[in-house]
Amino acid sequence: MPRESLIGRMYRKVFGYLASRFPPTPWSDLTRRTVETVQRQVPRSHAEKYELKTIWYWYPLYCLGGISFVAFITLTITGILLGFYYIPDGTIEYTFNQEVTSRAYQSMQFIMNDIPFGFMIRGMHHWGAHIMIAAVFLHMMRVYFTGAYKKPRELNWLLGAVLMIITLLFGYSGYVLPANDLSRAAATIGINMTKAAPGPAWLGQFATMLLFGEPDPTGFYIIRMYWLHVFVLPLVGILLMIAHMALVWIQGVAEPH
Amino acid sequence: MQIEAVREGVFEGKPGFPIQYGPERTDHQPGIPFWPHEVYRDLVIVFILVAIIFFMSALWTPIVGPSANPAVQPFSVPDWYLLFSWGLLKIADLFPEGRIPDGLGGTINVDAAFWGDVLSLIPILPMFLIPFIDRGRETRPAKAPIRSAAGMYMIAFVFFASVYATNDRIIATWSFVHDDMLKWFFIVPPILVGIASYVGIRRLGFRDMYWWLVVSVGAAFTLVTTVAIQVFLLGPWGADGIDPVTRLGHLFGNASGQPLFWFVLIVIVYTGILFFATALLRERKAKGIVMIASLATFFLVAGLVKFFADTNPTGNLLALRVLAYHGNWFVALPLFALITFYVGTRTPYSTYEYLLNECYQCGKCHTVCPVTKVEDDALGGLNLVYNTFKKQHDGVPLWTCLACDACSAVCPLDIKYSDYILEERSKAMAPKTAADRGRHAG
């Protein structure tokens, strides 16, 4: 019997690896059938099928990814509303009484004090962010402790890890925006840590100029963080979230068992 | 036509493949309808979440605070989810600094900020490596003690790094806390949490615990004793700067050393009792002794604090300072010994849960079980593990089982049915507590 060629073996190895994780399934046909079915069925989970009552207290933990997604939608809506009034200009100005201020800070004061229910919108944005980050942390712990990152879901775990870092960056760039004392302190720490990025010196300098636009926090960093917060991170984040949830749909939820 | 083709492919009942006993397969139960069941279930969660966010923003308005001011050095704590990074940045100055060549002609400036960046990778880098390191098939946390303990270690590490980030606030609030003690938070408590989790999770799997407990509690006892000797003879007192000669005078003559001596002695004796109870006594007696010793120690320490606060306030304060300075040893280790002892000897509340509920009704156990071949009640229709797990049997397997382990030998999921049977029998025959009025005494 002739031995298989090297190319053939490599081909089988690579495509075998991929096919065991992403089996060739006619997704477009299945989607069309699902859409055209009148009575759609959500398949029962393993735990429901075998009535494994003993781990019922784990069920809420399987909702944490969904909770962070709902919190993200809340943040999107309230963020759009805040965007109507927020001015991303952190340049230091002085009032007639020689008080320090900036247009970003003034717009924050306007949102909090003058706009009807502006403080509620900002409050929901603030607390929604805290809840989303907490939910993402807990979601990661649940996936870790139930071993849901194992084959065939390695890629989805990596996507989730990137998404968690994006969530943290969302949080950081978000609380830099109000141009208050906390914002300045956070920007100082962030600029110093970015400057000291492990690697050659020019790398840290370049990253600092790219992310903050200045080597010392004078106020220009606000517009960079704003663009990250409202364009770059949402774009990358939403694309990755779609991929994350599509993979959950394709590979199925890792069952508690 | 299709059905017949499927039946052709089923091996059950053909030569060499015994008939499947037990309840009918339930794999093909329909799911729940997307509309309205699933939609309503999801909407409940969405509404609750939005309501929580809404009420939080109504009750706790996030204040904007003063404007950013270049003239004022800001003193602010970042949000809680970035505290761990800040804590790691704060201990970064412990590491060597300097310049190293980057191989491209330039140099890399190794300073505190550099180490802060590198240390912040400690929680983040393993995250990307986990799926390629841990490649086993076990998913249950209770069945994978090493993975679970490593996770608990990491959670504790991030938590205590976050606590350390607020070190100046802590010291401003409690003046007896010393920064050196807080620095140990990065090493000691996470390791203790990891070991205690590992021991507790092994216990959930009904595995033998003796050596784990003896080594853990014994190590705690040894460490406490070593640190006590070091404190009395060699080591630092904390921030008070007393020289060794005066220190020995405190210990043996001066009254202001008395409270410290008694407190450290109590810690050593308590940890020692735990160690010897673990190593020498039978489990039930050890539990009783440890409970009595813990209560006695608690009241003794509380009483002594009150007594010394009245009679010897200087010595009391000194003792408090030194104990707090060595808090990672004199406070954390006895607690660790107690918690490890508790999680290592407690009876898991349900043997069903950890021993049987992996069963997926293959029925192999019934096929090989010798009892079911002679016992009328068990003939036909009995799926040994599954029916026991579902509490569907009438007690026949419990009292007729030979514990021959034939079922475990064929079980594809390694369920130890005879372990479960022996556990249940011993539970049924064990002397009960006073609550059932001695009916089962003996």
Image (cartoon, coloured by chain):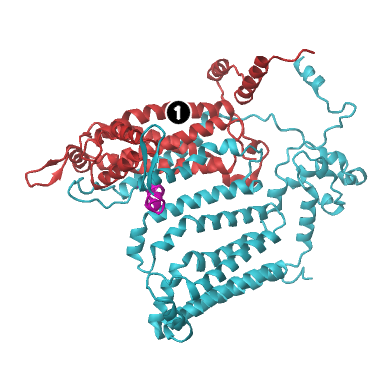
- Quadrant housing residue B278: bottom right
In the rendered structure, the colour chosen for chain A is red
Instruction: Identify the residue shown where x is 60% and y is 19%.
Output: A25
| Residue placed under numbered mark 1 in the picture | A240
Q: Position of residue B37 (x, y in %)?
A: 54, 33
Q: Which quarter of the figure is the N terminus of chain B placed in?
A: top right
In the image, is B388 to the left or to the right of B59?
A: right
Compared with B326, A72 (above or below) is above
Q: Position of residue B406 (x, y in %)?
A: 85, 44
Label tally: 1
* Residue farthest toward the front in the current orientation of the protein: B105
Task: Say if the magenta span includes residue B167.
Answer: no
Q: Colour of chain B?
A: cyan
**Mark 1 nearby-residue class (10 Å; few <14, some 14–19, many ≥20):** some
- Residue at the location (38% across, 81% down)? B313
Estimate the x, y position of residue A139 in percent, counting from the top left.
50, 41
**Residue A104 visible here:** yes
In terms of image quadrants, where is residue A113? Answer: top left
The amino acid beneath tag 1 is Leu
Residue shown at 65% from the left, 60% from the top: B344
Outermost top residue:
A2
Q: Chain of mark 1?
A: A
Q: Can you give x and y, in whole percent of width and height, for residue B50 in the image?
A: 39, 40
Query: The residue tagged with tag 1: helix, strand or loop?
Result: helix
Q: Is residue B164 above or below residue A41?
A: below
The part of the chain drawn in magenta is B79-96
- Reply above or below: A216 against B401: above
Per the image, is B89 magenta? yes
The answer to whether residue A41 is seen in the rendering is no
Of all residues, the one furthest to the right in this rendering is B374
The residue nearer to you, when weighing B96 against B354, is: B96
